[in-house]
Image (tube, helix red, strand yellow):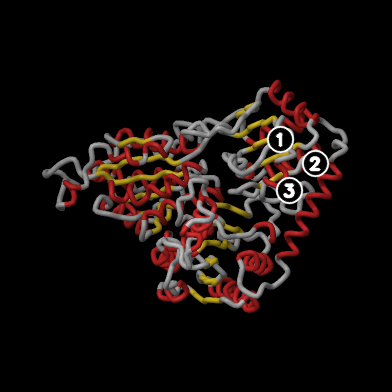
Amino acid sequence: MEFAPETVGEAWLRLLKARGVDFLFANAGTDFPSIVEGIARAEQLGIDIPRPVLCGHENAAVSMAHGHAMVSGRAQAAMVHVNVGTANALNGVINADRDYVPLLLAAGRTPFLESGEAGARSLNIHWAQEMFDQAGMVRESVRWDYELKDPRLLVHATDRALALAHSDPGGPVYLTLPRELLAMEPAGDEIDAPPLLAPARLGAPDPADIARAVQALLAAKSPLIVTARAGVDKTVPALLSKLAARLGAPVVEYRPRHLSLSSEDAYHGGFEVSPWLAEADVVLVLECDVPWMPGSDGTHPGLTVIQAGIDPLQARYPLRGFRSDLTIRAAPRLFIQSMLDELGSGEPPARAAAMRDRCLAMRQAAREAGTQMPRQMTMAWASACLDRARAQGSILVNEYPLVRSVMTTTEPGEFYGSSPAGGLGWGLPAALGAKLAAPDREVIAAVGDGSHLFANPIACHQIAAAENIPILVMIFNNAGWGAVARATRAMYPDGYATRANRMPLTRFEPVPDFAAVARACGCWGDTVDDPASLPDALDRAFAEIRANGRCAVLDVRCAG
């Protein structure tokens, strides 16, 4: 039996599902009554809508949508409460923007009317929460924003939002939904009809540019490929392996956000660019916003740089001065395939064997460091133990602490790193979203203690328990913000802060009992500080996930 939607809010939920949105991550407010009623009606009448997930903090809602989309490739929806909810969500929006992650962020809007209609103002907050330009908070970090003004525009606005979110380069979009409008009767548009708009995708690169790139790389004495996110397209790692082999060029995954090449590939050059950069005479920068540090990494005096990707010059970065002698705007898959077609069959250059030997030696030296148990817990040891304990095909969601050089990561979609924007608090909720996108795979959130605090762990643990999302949260706990301490030492090596017994604003003392917090929220939790005890602790954590389907939090106390 067909049940027509009773309100615009209910019609919007049905429309989202018809457009492939499987989840609505919601932090509800007084602008939500029509959404709440629509969900309840759908549940009781068996109407298909996105699965609603109640999120105790807006950052969790947006980051869960981010995590799902980075695994599935499909934008999910998050909805927050008017301007204040949007403000709390902004950190996650900035992360998604800079990492080209498609998601739909919706927010309520304070009612227009002071009285007289369903949905009119009924609480004192409905005056104070109105802004002249609510979307102004997010406009710099979204691809599009719009306030729905008429029920007849519901399909048009939603289809445009999702098409732009998925267009190259992808990113978040923002849709404001006034409370009165959500309570109105829908306009009767056919929500099951095909979408009005298809996303705009980048095509193949100019053959002349490809020929120039191939010529430069073949003529190079020491070519280098640097990437951070080419593997966002899961067909790329296999293609990139072929390209590296054909060119005899090492590939460095620099500050990676996706797995772009198997760590076991003969041409995997590690995760730091500095061992290769000074001698490289041609560098291919492929899907990488920051390929090296200009202030500390020396470059070859005659260096030629080729930049390629969906947004190779990072047009929305106010300042970015990395040279580009040849700029090619194309999707990474199409770029690499065009390069391979231009190269054709043939033997790699004579330098190839030496490059392979050097990559192998670097990989072996790094792995050796992960086999020697230290006297105190280190992040390298914790990373190596995690790598040995995790299931094949598991997903790693890394917010900074993993030492990739001691780990084996081989499959596309196996690794995801945090956005270059660096908005902390992403890793834990993103891992929850990733698990919802890939329920049959184990998911591990690797976070520092600082980023764990930013994630609002009580809100995230409550979501994990309420929604039965069994992931491992591994906290690499050095009792402070190591990045702040390192930056201070680098700028002031002989300064007062460096010489101080306790550097200001960098230490968390007393250290919270994160495991107890997790247990209080219905998750499994444990703490370990002995390097010898870590393998058994990991086995217990994974056993809890696998046998009982419960989120497990392991607090690993590392040396500062």
Residue at x 49% of width, y 33% of height = 319
Describe residue 360's horizontal placement relative to residue 64 as left or right.
Answer: right
Q: Which mark is residue 300?
A: 1
Amino acid type assigned to the residue bearing label 3 in the image: Gly
Q: Counting other residues with Cα less than 10 Å from the Cα at mark 1, is it few (<14), some (14-19), or many (20 or more)?
A: few
Q: Nearer the viewer, residue 256 or 78?
A: 256
Which structural element holds mark 1?
loop
Q: Which percent across, then down, holds residue 410? A: 71, 54
In whole angstroms, how far apart are the C-alphas of marks 3 and 2? 12 Å
Q: Is residue 319 visible?
A: yes
Asked which secondary structure carries label 2, the reply is helix
Q: Disc 3 or disc 2, which is closer to the eye?
A: 3
Badge 3 local density, few (<14 within 10 Å), some, or many (20+)?
many
Q: Is 159 or 451 nearer to us in this picture?
A: 451
Residue 71 horizontal side relative to residue 364, left or right: left
First-in-chain label (3 vs 2): 2
The CA span between labels 3 and 1 is 18 Å
Residue drawn 47% across the image and 74% down it: 515
- Residue 276 location, x and y as percent? 72, 44
Front residue (pair 8, 133): 133
The amino acid pointed to by label 1 is His
First of labels 1, 2 by sequence position: 2
Which callout, 3 or 1, points at the residue further toward the start of the chain?
Answer: 3
Q: Which residue is mark 3?
A: 269
Picture disc at residue 18: none
Q: CA distance from mark 1 to mark 2?
A: 23 Å
Kindly identify which numbered label has been placed on residue 245: 2
